[in-house]
C-alpha cells in the first residue's frame, strides 16, 4: 500500500479492482484519467500474479494502490477501496469494472444525478446510488439498472436489447450494477458495505435491496455511459457462476425480502432454484452445484441474523417494496417460462 497519509482533495474516489487483468485494468485507468469530473483513483489488487501493481507504482504515482493478500472476490476487493475512501473523507465512491471503459463524462453525469432539480426544487432528496447505461462492446445493452422479481431472481434491465433509446429516461430503479455505479458514503456508513460472503454475483443487488429498505433511492441516468467487455473475469474460473448463483440467490431472498412477501416469493423461488440446479446438473456441473447449496445452508443462520438487523431497521413499508419488485420472470429465463406455462396449463399456478 502506498499514499498511506493521503488526504482527498476531491469529493469522489473511483475504485478499480484488478485480479490478473492487467491490460484491461490499465485501459480502464487510462479512461478514468480522461474524466471531465475531478476524481481520485484507487486501484485495488486481489493478490494477482501479473505486473499490475509494479506497473502502477512505477508509472502512476498519483494513484492510490491497495494490495490484498488474497483474492477477496468483487465484494471484498471493492470493500478494501471503500474503507480507504471512508477513512479519507470522500463523499462518494464510484465502482467501475476493470474490463469496462467509461465515456469521458461518465462520472460527471453520475454526480449530476445525485441531486437532480427542476426550477431549483430537489426531486430526489435521498439518492444513495446512481447507475448509468452500461453497454456491451457490440453496442447492445448490458445493464440499465437491476430488477428483483417475484420469483426471487434478479436480472439486469434491458440486457441484450438493442440500444434504441428505450432507456433514455432519468428514473428510479430497483438496483444498480456494481460494474459502473456511484455510491454515497453517508448511505454506506448507514447500511454497511458489500456482503463479502457473496464474493461475487448478486452482491450489488443485495446492497441495492438494503439501500431501498433503509429508505435510500437508486437512480438511473442514461447520460452516464460505459462499455463493458462481459465475462473477462468470471470466465477465468470454470464453474464460478454456478457456484455463486447456488449460494447467493437464497441469501439475497432471506436477508432482504419482508416477511409479508415471503409467501409470494418463496414458492416461486423454490421452483426457480430447483430448475437452475437441474439445468446445471444436466451440464455436468455437479461439484459447483453441491458446493453452492452446501455453503448456502451452512451460512444461513448467519444470514438470518443479518436479516434481523436489516428488517428491524427498515424505514419503508412492505407495500413500497412490493411496488418496486417486478412481478414476472426475467426475460431470458426461457426454461422457467416453459415451466410456468405447464403449471398454468394444469391449474397449479394462477
Image (cartoon, grey):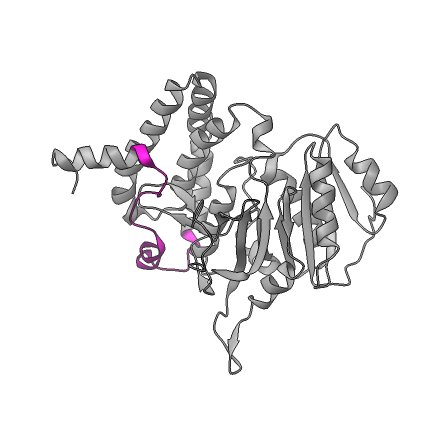
Q: Is residue 269 left or right of residue 188?
A: left
Q: Nearer the viewer, residue 274 or 280?
A: 280
Is 329 a magenta residue?
Answer: yes
Q: Nearer the viewer, residue 145 or 101?
A: 101
In the image, the segment drawn in magenta is 312-335
Determine the residue positioned at 32% across, 58% down: 323
Is 275 a magenta residue?
Answer: no
Q: Is residue 245 left or right of residue 233?
A: left
**Is 121 located above or below residue 27 in the figure?**
below
Q: Is residue 312 left or right of residue 6?
A: left
Q: Nearer the viewer, residue 197 or 175?
A: 175
Determine the residue positioned at 43% across, 29% down: 246
**Is 132 located above or below residue 74 in the figure?**
below
- Residue 230 percent across, percent down from the top left: 56, 39
Indicate the quadrant containing the N terminus: top left, top right, bottom left or bottom right: top right
**Tag count:** 0
Indicate the quadrant containing the C terminus: top left, top right, bottom left or bottom right: top left
Amino acid at each position: 500500500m502506498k499514499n498511506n497519509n493521503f488526504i482527498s482533495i476531491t469529493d469522489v474516489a473511483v475504485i478499480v479492482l484488478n485480479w490478473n487483468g492487467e491490460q484491461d485494468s490499465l485501459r480502464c485507468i487510462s479512461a478514468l484519467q480522461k474524466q471531465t469530473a475531478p476524481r481520485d483513483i484507487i486501484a485495488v489488487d486481489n493478490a494477482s500474479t501479473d505486473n499490475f501493481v509494479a506497473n502502477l507504482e512505477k508509472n502512476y504515482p498519483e494513484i492510490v494502490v491497495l494490495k490484498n493478500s488474497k483474492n477477496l472476490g468483487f465484494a471484498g476487493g471493492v470493500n478494501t477501496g471503500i474503507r480507504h475512501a471512508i477513512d479519507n473523507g470522500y463523499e462518494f465512491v464510484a465502482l467501475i469494472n476493470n474490463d469496462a471503459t467509461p465515456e469521458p463524462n461518465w462520472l460527471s453525469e453520475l454526480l449530476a444525478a445525485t441531486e437532480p432539480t427542476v426550477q431549483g426544487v430537489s426531486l430526489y432528496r435521498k439518492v444513495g446510488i446512481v447507475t448509468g447505461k452500461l453497454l456491451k462492446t457490440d453496442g447492445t445493452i448490458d445493464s440499465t439498472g437491476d430488477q428483483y422479481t417475484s420469483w426471487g431472481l434478479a436480472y439486469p434491465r434491458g440486457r441484450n436489447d438493442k440500444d434504441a433509446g428505450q432507456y433514455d429516461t432519468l428514473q428510479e430503479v430497483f438496483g444498480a450494477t456494481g460494474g459502473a455505479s456511484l455510491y454515497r458514503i453517508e448511505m454506506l456508513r448507514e447500511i454497511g458495505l458489500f456482503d463479502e460472503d457473496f464474493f461475487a454475483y448478486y452482491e450489488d443487488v443485495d446492497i441495492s435491496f438494503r439501500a431501498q429498505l433503509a429508505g435510500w433511492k437508486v437512480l438511473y441516468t442514461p447520460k452516464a455511459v460505459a462499455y463493458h467487455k462481459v465475462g473477462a473475469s468470471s470466465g477465468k474460473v470454470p464453474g464460478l457462476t454456478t457456484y455463486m448463483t447456488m449460494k447467493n440467490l437464497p441469501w439475497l431472498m432471506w436477508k432482504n425480502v419482508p416477511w409479508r412477501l415471503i409467501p409470494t416469493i418463496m414458492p416461486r423461488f423454490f421452483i426457480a432454484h430447483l430448475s437452475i440446479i437441474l439445468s446445471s446438473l444436466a451440464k455436468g456441473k455437479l461439484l459447483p452445484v453441491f458446493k453452492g447449496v452446501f455453503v448456502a445452508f451452512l451460512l444461513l443462520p448467519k444470514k438470518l441474523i443479518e436479516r434481523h438487523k436489516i428488517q428491524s431497521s427498515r424505514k419503508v413499508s412492505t407495500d413500497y417494496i412490493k411496488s418496486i419488485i417486478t412481478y414476472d420472470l426475467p426475460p431470458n429465463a426461457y426454461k422457467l417460462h416453459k415451466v410456468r406455462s405447464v403449471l398454468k396449463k394444469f391449474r397449479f399456478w394462477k
